[in-house]
Amino acid sequence: MRLIARLLVLCLSLSSLPGFAATVNDLYQVREPVASQEPGERDAALGRALETLVLRLTGSREAAQSPALAELRKDPQQIVSQYGYENDKLLVDFDPVSTDRSLRQAGLALWGANRPAILTWWLNDASTGTSMVGDGQSSAAPLRQAAQHRGLPLRLPLADLSEQLVATPENITADDPSALRSASERYAADALLAVQAREDNGQWQAEWRLWLGDAREQGTVQGADQSALADAIMLAVSERLAPRFAVKPGAASSLTLEVQGTNLARYAELQRILEPFGAALRKVEGDRLVYQVNASADQLRAQLSLAQLHEAPAEPAVNTVPSGAPATQQPETPVQPRTDVLRFRW
């Protein structure tokens, strides 16, 4: 009861929060096109759905072909909870527990459902003219479908008049995203994706740039149509982001996490972020929370950075002078800070 009472006191300091990573609720649900509902076509689609899911969870195109997944490729239904038909697609729901267990047993690094929310500024340059893709427009449908297919939380600007003035080819293709970042603040996203897409004789090609914190990724892709182009970009973004967050089996260890500057809303957000790490809240002191977690330090840093948390310098371990020794006596070797304790603050 004492711990609960301390948590309730945190509500006195409620404040608005910056954007956090988004939980991908349909991460284990895959849609694959089918030509018919014949058993052979269904089985082929189940195999493609498995490949899509493995790529979505690992960010690696080679992972699905791992020899350790040979038996799973022969019978994907062993990790399928249900499937059915949705228009011209096979809708497959994979079981998260058995899926993760199978992939970890295969030695694959997995990227969890807590992923960066990506605000996408997309400019189409077609034969009919140049247009910005905004939330609610019909042109946004291929982007949303591609993001869902690749397991990415997508956000789109409203594309109102002020944003259309910002979404110029010069700003979209600029190495400095200052103009786009300023216009993106109200959407509270974690990452910024800028895309300049062009149509040429019925084919589409695009330049894309992605900013996450101080890091930048970029590339070029091609597609037969806008749907193929959007999927190629989302796939490329997924492959660039996954290595930052995916963790290999056995990389996790028991860590103590201390977080300062917490209020009730931030406590709730921390619970969501730390849930995959088996977090146990051990102590509450004012706005300071102490957790015990089972995680990789690098993955934990990556996830907490999405919540706008900043790592505090490690405190060196205390090295006391033995009793009776002269006060001027110094330890023979410097004392190293503890590596099993991570400290963060808002």
Image (tube, helix red, strand yellow):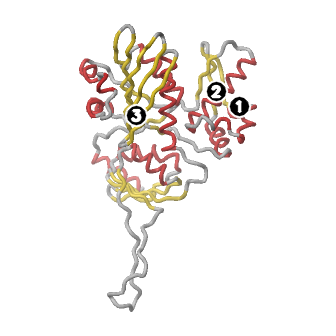
Tell me the crowding category of disc 2: few under 14, some 14 to 19, or many 20 or more residues within 10 angstroms, Cα based.
many
Residue wearing tag 1? 76
Q: Mark number for residue 286?
A: none
Give the camera-side residue of 295 and 211.
Answer: 211
**Disc with the residue nearer the chain's start (2 vs 3):** 2
Residue 122 is situated, as x and y percent measured from the top left of the image, at 38, 22
Residue wearing tag 3? 210
Marks 1 and 3, how far apart in space?
Answer: 34 Å
Q: Are marks 1 and 2 in contact (CB under 8 Å)?
A: yes
Give the camera-side residue of 229 and 157.
Answer: 229
SS of the residue under disc 2: helix
Q: Is residue 345 left or right of residue 67?
A: left
- Discs 1/3, front: 3
Q: Which amino acid type is marked by label 2?
A: Ala
Q: Residue at x 60, y 34 (%)?
A: 61
Q: Which amino acid type is marked by label 1?
A: Pro
Give the camera-side residue of 142 and 277.
Answer: 142
Residue 228 is situated, as x and y percent measured from the top left of the image, at 52, 19
Looking at the picture, does residue 299 appear above or below residue 316? above
Q: Residue at x 64, y 27 (%)?
A: 49
Q: Which amino acid type is marked by label 3?
A: Leu
Q: Mark number for residue 49?
A: 2
Looking at the picture, does residue 46 appear above or below residue 214? above
Looking at the picture, does residue 190 appear above or below residue 278? above
SS of the residue under disc 3: strand
User: Looking at the rendering, in which quadrant would you find the N terminus?
Assistant: bottom left
**Disc with the residue nearer the chain's start (1 vs 3):** 1
Marks 1 and 2, how far apart in space?
Answer: 9 Å
